[in-house]
């Protein structure tokens, strides 16, 4: 049992087992759900550029819902968007993460404070949501 070759084989087998177990535990998101969310995401690209404030506001709210669904798929839970965003910091670079939070807060102002979102703000929000959902569901 003191044979170095035997000990090396045992260590290699244990490493292989750990590798297999860790690869089984990776988060794989169902392809159909991903495609559905991406289709839904891109369907709001025209609404974001609308001249009508109500259409832009509705699009921002629905884009945030897509973000929420993406985070729920990633974390395999049904927590609200804000709670999942707190856990999502490791997914993003710091600047991206802060921009995403700012966009989510803007959505909250739209919903709770009847905020009149400009076309430029709406376009920027769409780009942030698009980047974020792509990164979450990759």
Image (cartoon, rainbow, N blue to C red):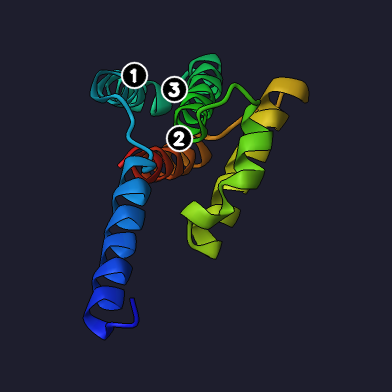
Count residues near mark 3 (Cα–Cα under 10 Å), then give few for <14, some for 14-19, many for 20+: few
**Residue 59, which numbered label?**
none
Residue behind mark 2? 74
Residue behind mark 1? 40
Nearer mark to the viewer, of 2 and 1: 2
Mark 3 secondary-structure assignment: loop
Q: CA distance from mark 1 to mark 3?
A: 21 Å
Please report contact status of discs 1 and 3: CB closer than 8 Å, yes or no: no
Specify which label sits upstream in the sequence, 2 or 1.
1
**Residue 51, which numbered label?**
3
Viewer-nearest residue: 2 or 135 = 2
Give residue 75's position: percent from left, percent from top.
51, 35
Give residue 51's position: percent from left, percent from top.
44, 22
Task: In the rendered view, tell whether residue 121 sits above or below residue 11.
Answer: above
Give residue 39's position: percent from left, percent from top.
27, 21
What is the quadrant of the N terminus in the image? bottom left
Viewer-nearest residue: 43 or 120 = 43
Specify which label sits upstream in the sequence, 2 or 3.
3
């Amino acid at each position: 049992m003191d044979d170095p070759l035997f000990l090396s084989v045992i260590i290699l087998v244990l490493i292989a087992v750990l590798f297999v177990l860790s690869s089984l535990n990776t988060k794989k998101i169902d392809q159909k759900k991903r495609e559905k969310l991406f289709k839904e995401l891109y369907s709001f690209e025209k609404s974001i550029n609308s001249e009508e404030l109500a259409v832009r506001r509705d699009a921002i709210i629905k884009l945030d819902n897509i973000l929420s669904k993406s985070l729920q798929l990633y974390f395999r839970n049904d927590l609200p968007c804000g709670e999942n965003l707190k856990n999502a910091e490791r997914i993003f670079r710091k600047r991206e993460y802060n921009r995403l939070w700012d966009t989510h807060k803007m959505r909250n102002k739209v919903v709770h404070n009847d905020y009149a979102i400009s076309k430029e703000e709406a376009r920027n929000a769409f780009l942030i949501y698009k980047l974020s959902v792509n990164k979450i569901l990759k």
